[in-house]
Image (cartoon, rainbow, N blue to C red):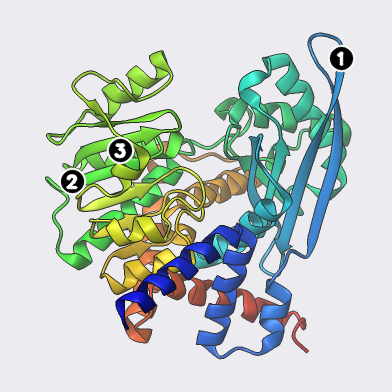
Amino acid sequence: MTTDAATAAAATAEAREETLNPFHIVQHQVREAVNALGLEPAVYEILKQPMRFFEVAIPVQLDDGSVRVFMGYRSQHNDALGPAKGGLRFHPQVFPDEVRALSMWMTFKCAVLGLPYGGGKGAIACNPKEMSPGELERLSRGFIRAVAPIIGPSKDIPAPDVYTNPQIMAWMVDEYSKLRWENQFGVMTGKPLIIGGSAGRNEATARGCVVTVREAAKKLGIPLKGARVVVQGYGNAGSIAARLIHELGAKVIAVSDSRGGAFDPDGLDPVKVLEYKNKNGSVEGAPGTRPISNDDLLTLECDILIPAALENQITVSVARRIKTRIIGEAANGPTTPEADDILFDRGVLVLPDILASAGGVTVSYFEWVQNLMNFYWTEEEVNQRLEAKMVEAFERVYAMHRDKKVKLRVAAFMVAVARVAEAMRVRGWLG
C-alpha cells in the first residue's frame, strides 16, 4: 500500500469510528462470531437487537419543591438461557442505543462464563453528582414503580453500575418488596450485606479482571512480579484492580480518573492514591506523582494496560501508539473494532470485556443463588468460586483463540454465541 493510500485508509477508519455507536459495534461483533461458527442467518437476526426495550418517564419532586421528569430505560436482550441480568447506571449522557448495546454485551458476558442468564441493562439520564440523597432516593423508587411489572428474581435482576451503589439497590429492593407485599431480596444484586448482599461482591469485577490478566501473563511468560501496569479509570473497578495486581507484585506506574491522571515511573501506592482521591476528588496531584493526560496514559510503555472507564477509549489513533503486551478490559466496550484489529496485528493480547469484566456478574449470580437458598457463603468461599469460574472461562476462550487462530474477542463471542444459539435451538426458536 502506498503512503497516500495508507493515509486515506487511516482517515476512513477514524471517520468510521466517529459514526459507530456501541450498538453498531456489538452487532458487528455478533455477526463476526456467527459467521466464524458457520451458524444459520436466523441466529444473527435474533441476536442483533434486544427482544424487549422499555422507556419510562419518572416524575421526581426535587428538594426545592419543583418536579422534574427523568427518562429511564431498561433493555432485555435475550432470555434463552435464563432471566435478564445487568446493571443500572445513572449518567447524564446515557442514550437508548448505549443501553441496548450494554444489554447485548451482558448476554454474551453471562454466556461465556456459563451463567444461567440472558443480558439486561438499564439507565436513568441524570447527573447524580448534582442531586441530594433524598432526590436520588425518590428517583430510585420512582424507577422501580415504573418498571416493576417487567423485573423480578425470575424475570430481570438489575445491579449497580456507573454512579449507582448498594444504597441505591437497597432503596429499589425496598420499593419492589412494598409493591409485592413481601421481601424480594433476589430482585437486585449488589445490595448491602444486611439485606442479602454477597460477601466479595464489591471487589468482584476487579478481582475477575486481575485473574484473567494473571492467566494471560502466564501464557505469554510475563512474570507479574515487577510488571508495569497502567490503569485508566479509578472508580470501584479500577482502584481495586490496581490494588489487587499491586499485591501480586506488579508495579502500578500510572492511574487516571475523569479529572486527571497520576504518573510515577517507579511505581505508586494504589491505596494511598485512592485515599488522596477520596479526600481531594481526583487522583491528579497525589503525593510523589506527576500529572499525565488520558492520551499519554493510554500510550505509556507498560506490560499491562487495564481500561476501567467508559466505552470507546482505545480508538484507532490510540491503538497505533499503544506500547503494552496485555490489555485487560475491566470496562464495557473500551476498544473500538478498528482499534481491536490494529492491536491484534501488532501482537497485543486483548482480554475482551465479556471475559475480563465478568467477575461482577459472576458474583451477582452467586448473590442471587444465595438469596434463593437463603443461605450465605463466606468471602473466602465466594472468591474461590469466582477464581474457578474465571480460570475455566479463560481457558475455554484461549483454547478457541488458539485453535481457530482468531482474536480473543472473537473467540469469546464464539464461545458465548454458540451457547446462546444452542439454547435457542433446543427451545425451538430457530425452526
Q: Quadrant of the C terminus?
A: bottom right
What is the secondary structure assignment of the residue under circle 3? helix
Tell me the mark number nearer the camera, choosing from 2 and 3. 2
Cβ atoms under marks 1 and 3 closer than 8 Å: no
The earlier-in-sequence mark between 2 and 3 is 2
| Residue 70 image-quadrant placement | top right
Q: Amino acid at mark 1?
A: Ser
Residue at 43% over, 57% down: 315
What is the secondary structure assignment of the residue under circle 1? loop
The image shows residue 308 at horizontal and vertical percentages of: 42, 44
Tell me the mark number nearer the camera, choosing from 1 and 3. 1
The earlier-in-sequence mark between 2 and 1 is 1
- Name the residue beneath numbered marker 3: 242
- Name the residue beneath numbered marker 2: 228
Q: Amino acid at mark 2?
A: Arg
Q: In this view of the protein, which residue sits in the foreground, 419 or 417?
A: 417
